[in-house]
Amino acid sequence: MRSLLATLGTVATAAVLLAGPAAAQQPGDDPFLWLEDVQGEKALTWVRQQNEKSTKVLEARKEYRPIFARTLEILDSKDKIPSPELLGETVYNFWQDDTHERGLWRRTSLASYRTAAPQWETVLDVDALAKAEGKAWVFHGASCLAPAYARCMVSLSPGGSDASVQREFDTRTKAFVPGGFSLPEAKSNVGWRDEETLWVGTDFGPGSLTVSGYPRIVKLWKRGTPLSAARTIFEGKAEDVASGASSSILSDGRYDVVARTPAFYRQEMFLFLGDRLVRLDVPEDCQPRGFFRDRLLLSLRSDWAAGGKTYLTGSLLAVPVDGLLRGAPRPEVLFEPAQRVSLASVQRTRDHVLVQTLDNVRSRIIALGLEGDAWKRSEVPTPGVGTASFSATDDTTETFFFTYQDFTTPSSLWLVEGGKEPVKVKSMPAFFDATGMKTEQLEATSKDGTKIPYFVVTPKGFKANGNAPALLYAYGGFEVSQVPRYSGAIGSAWLSRGGVYVLANIRGGGEFGPAWHKAAVKANHIHNFEDFAAVAQDLIARKISSPRRLGIMGGSQGGLLVGGTFTLYPELFNAVVAQVPLADMRRFSHLLAGASWMAEYGDPDKPEDWAYIQTWSPYQLLKADAKYPTPFYWTNTRDDRVHPAHARKMVAKMEAQGHPVYYFENTEGGHGSGAVNKQTARVTALQYAYLWMMLR
C-alpha cells in the first residue's frame, strides 16, 4: 500500500500585477514554444550552445575544480552509511561509488549489517547490466512479494526519467525471470497480488492514461497470459491524476486496495473483496498511512465528523476496517496536533505504530501499541534536537532503524530491537570541519504578520556586519517539510569556505501540518513568495548578510519559488540558483505531469485562476526594463516530471530582453541532479562556483 500511495502522491516589496486575464500570454504569443520540443534538433542545438557558454565561465572559476573533486569524493565515499531496507530478516541496500557508477543492489544478514564490515552479496549489478544491454540504466528500486521477498518487480529507467521498464526478478537465483512479467518503458504502477498475479497500471494504448500522463486503468494480470488479456478492475477518469492498486500483505492481515486520485490531496479508496470493490467511507482528502491490527491508519487534512465526534485537522487516526465497511467508523486518536507540533511520518513494526512528529521543526519519535483495546504510548529517545527519521522497518519483527542528523552533525543510524533502548550501529564520517559553526533558529514576520521560522548556520569567525555571503534555501509546497540535515556538499563547498547557510520554513510546506500547507495554495500561493522575501529582509535587517551578498536556491517547486521571488523582489538578491524549476505557469498544466499540480497552483486556463497565477508566474513577470540579479538555471533533458522547457524558456526570454543569465542542461538525471555521481558532482560544483563568483 505504501508504494501505491507514494506513486499516486508523486506523484517546493510590491507585487507586479499584469493587466488581467485578457492580457495573459497565450501559447500562440510565445516566441519560445519551440524549446518545448524536448529532443528537437533546434532545441538541443540551443542547449549545447548555452552549456558551452556557461560552463566555459563557471568551470574556469578557481572554486570549480576543488569543489567538484571534493563532492565526488564524498558521493563515492565507502564510509557512507549503507542505507538499509529490511525485507524480513535480510537487509538490502543500493550502493554507488567510484567503481560502481550505476550501482549495486546487494544484501546481507541483519547480524552482518551490524558489524563494521558487513559481508555483502551482490543481487544485481546495474553497471554490468547497462554494459551488457547497451542502456544507461538507472535503478529505481524493486517491489518484492511478502513474506518470502523472492519475486520482485525491478524498475529500470533509461537515463533517470520517471518512466521506466519493469522486469520480474528472482532474488534466489539473482536473475531476471525468463518469460516472467515485463513491461516496456512507461510511468507504470505495478504491485504483487500473489506470485501468479500482478496489479498493473500502465500505458495500455490510446485513452489509457490521464492528462497528467499516469495510468487511468487498473488491471489484474495473470502469469503466462499476454498483457492484452489482463482483466480490468477499475477505470478512473481522463482528468484524474491517476488510479492504481496494491496488496498490503502484512503479519496481521491482508488488504487489496484500489485507489483513484482525482486530484492531489484527494483520493477514493476501495477494498477489493472477493470480486467486488467496496468504497471506504473516509474523507477524500485524508492521507492513508497503512494498516495495523484490522485498522486503517489515516491522517486528516481537514476536520472530520464521524461517530458523533469531530476529529481535528492534522490528527492521526486508527479506524477499524469492519466499522468502515458497515458505515459506522469508530476512529481512535493516535496523535492530535498542537501549536507548532505536527505529524511528520508513520511506520509500523509487528506490534507498534511508529510516529515521527515535528515540534517547531525538531523531531520526536513515539511508539504506540495496543493492550486490549487501549493504546499505550512511549517515546523512543533520540540523540538530540535535530532530525530523527525512520530508515527501515518491517512488520514481521519489532526491529526498526532510524537516522539522526542536523546541519553540523553527520548522520548516524540507530537500531531499535524489541522495545529496547536505541543502539547506534553506523555513523557517517564528518565531511567538513564544523568547529566554530553555530546553528540558530530565528523568525521573520511576513507581509500579513505571520511568523516564519528559519534556521541559520554560521561559519567559524562569523560577524554580523552584512558582509557574509549567505545562501537562502526553501521549498514551500506540496506539504513537504524542510528539516535540518547534514550535507557534506553544502558543508565543504559553502560553510567551510565562509558562507552562511539559511533554511526557511515558509508556508506551503508541511512543517506545521496541513493548515500551514493550505495557507499557500492556489489564490494564497503569493504567501510563498512573501514569506521567502520576509526571511531575506530579516537576514538583511539583522546584518547576517546584505543584498550584495545574499543568494537564493530552490529546486522544482522551489525553483518556481526562487524564480518568482527574484522577479518580484530583485533588489534583495545578487544570486539565484533555480534547479529543475517550474517557470511558465501559463503553460505548466499542458507540460508532462503538470496537470496533476493544479490542486496546488490552480488552473491557468480558467480566467479566475489565471488572475492570481499571473501575479507570481516568473516567465510572465519578466520585464526588459527591470534590473535583475544574474541567475543560474539548470535542468535535465530526461526530466519527464517538470518539463525542461520551463528553464529553457525562462533563460531564452531573459536573454532576448537583454538580461545576463547562466544555463546548464544535463542529458541524464530525470527530476534530480544526475544519474551517476559524476553528474551530481559537476552540477554541484557549477552551482557553488557560480555562487562564489556572484557573492564573494
Image: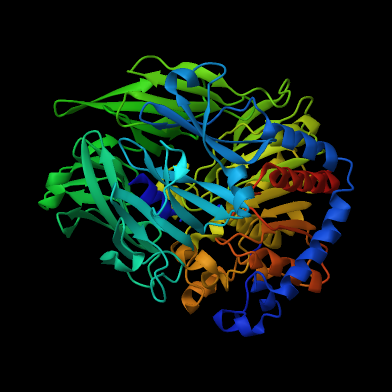
User: Closer to the camera, 681 or 596?
Assistant: 681
- Percent x, y of residue 97: 66, 35
In screen coordinates, is 658 left or right of 495?
A: right
- Percent x, y of residue 499: 77, 36
Residue at image point 46% right, 38% down = 174
Return the residue found at the far front: 178
User: Closer to the camera, 199 or 27?
Assistant: 199
Residue 499 seen in this snapshot: no
Q: With respect to residue 228, does 174 lie above or below?
A: above
Residue at image point 14% right, 26% down = 372
| Quarter of the image that includes the C terminus | top right
In screen coordinates, is 284 left or right of 120?
A: left
Q: With respect to residue 39, does 105 lie above or below?
A: above
In screen coordinates, is 522 left or right of 3?
A: right
Q: With respect to residue 380, does 616 lie above or below?
A: below
Residue 279 seen in this snapshot: yes
In screen coordinates, is 204 left or right of 556?
A: left
- Percent x, y of residue 235: 29, 68
- Percent x, y of residue 491: 71, 32
On the image, which quarter does residue 418 sit in?
Answer: top left
On the image, which quarter does residue 31 sit in?
Answer: bottom right
User: Closer to the camera, 399 or 624?
Assistant: 399
Q: How is the image coloured?
A: rainbow
User: Closer to the camera, 55 or 342?
Assistant: 55
How many numbered discs, if any?
0
Residue at image point 18% right, 39% down = 294
On the image, which quarter does residue 331 sit in?
Answer: top left
